[in-house]
Image: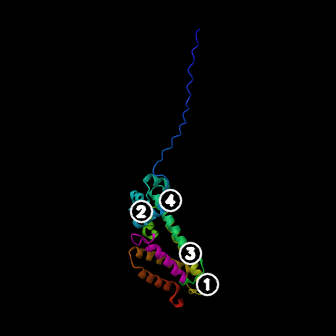
């Protein structure tokens, strides 16, 4: 009797695990940085060296970001410069807005504005940096219409803020009624620009404060200071 041959047991089919999709390749540095901190580093560098003297390699070293990451986050060097300047203006506005809006005697108000300004102008690990507008943006404004518009807008905003202060001071009798608040505002702004330039040249703070006191005497009227 012939026995039927037994079929070998079927081999178990091993199912391979589905291949995980390949992760897309990332270009440049992962976005592990903090944009506001990086922008602040760029701002510090532009304030110190200006636009032309600041290279992309300098910006990369200061921010810890390579070039592709800088381009991806902020655009080219000009765009980064403009964003840095906008950040500077926003920070300065935030530091002074309460002083301009509050109700203070005109002498105290002006003294506080200039004190905050000197804090901004004198700060800097490598020495006083002055004002971004006066020290670098005004130069770039000659050939760049967008930067020029920002500079002029900043001048206008500052003049209006000072003019409102002087109008209130005239109404209160703190400043002679014959005074022109617009002209006084321009003098107040010019004083800010003067101490910014001198601060950059490392004139001591005490000397700058003496200029401020003299300017306030002229703007308010020496006869009205008491």
* Secondary structure of the residue carrying numbered label 3: helix
The quarter of the picture where the C terminus appears is: bottom right
Magenta segment, which residues? 108-131
What is the spatial separation of the Cα atoms under label 1 and label 3, in whole angstroms? 16 Å
According to the picture, the residue beneath numbered tag 4 turns out to be 35
Instruction: Say which residue label 3 marks.
Output: 161
Disc 4, SS: helix
Of pointers 1 and 3, the one earlier in the residue sequence: 3
**Residue at 39% across / 57% down in the picture?**
57
Magenta segment includes 193: no
Question: What is the CA distance from the residue labelled 2 to the residue labelled 3?
Answer: 29 Å
Where is residue 46 shown, x and y percent of the image? 43, 64
The residue singled out by tag 2 in the image is: 51
**Can you tell which of label 4 and label 3 is closer to the viewer?**
4
Q: Are marks 2 and 3 in contact (CB under 8 Å)?
A: no
| Residue named by callout 1 | 171
């Amino acid at each position: 009797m012939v026995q039927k041959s037994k079929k070998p047991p079927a081999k178990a089919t091993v199912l391979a695990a589905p291949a995980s999709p390949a992760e897309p390749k990332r270009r440049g540095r992962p976005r592990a940085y903090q944009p506001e901190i990086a922008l602040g580093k760029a701002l510090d560098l532009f304030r110190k060296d200006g636009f032309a003297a600041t290279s992309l390699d300098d910006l990369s070293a200061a921010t810890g970001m390579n070039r592709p990451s800088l381009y991806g986050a902020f655009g080219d060097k000009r765009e980064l410069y403009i964003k840095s300047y906008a950040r500077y203006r926003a920070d300065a506005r935030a530091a002074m807005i309460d002083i301009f809006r509050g109700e203070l005697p005109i002498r105290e108000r002006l003294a506080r504005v200039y004190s905050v300004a000197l804090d901004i102008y004198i700060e800097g690990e490598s020495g006083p940096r002055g004002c971004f507008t006066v020290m670098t943006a005004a130069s770039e404004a000659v050939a760049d219409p967008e930067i020029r518009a920002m500079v002029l807008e900043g001048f206008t905003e500052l003049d209006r803020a000072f003019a409102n202060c002087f109008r209130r001071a005239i109404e209160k009798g703190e400043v002679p009624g014959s005074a022109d608040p617009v002209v006084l505002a321009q003098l107040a702004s010019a004083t800010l620009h003067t101490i910014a330039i001198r601060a950059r040249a490392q004139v001591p703070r005490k000397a700058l404060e003496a200029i401020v006191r003299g300017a306030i005497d002229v703007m308010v009227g020496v006869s009205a200071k008491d």
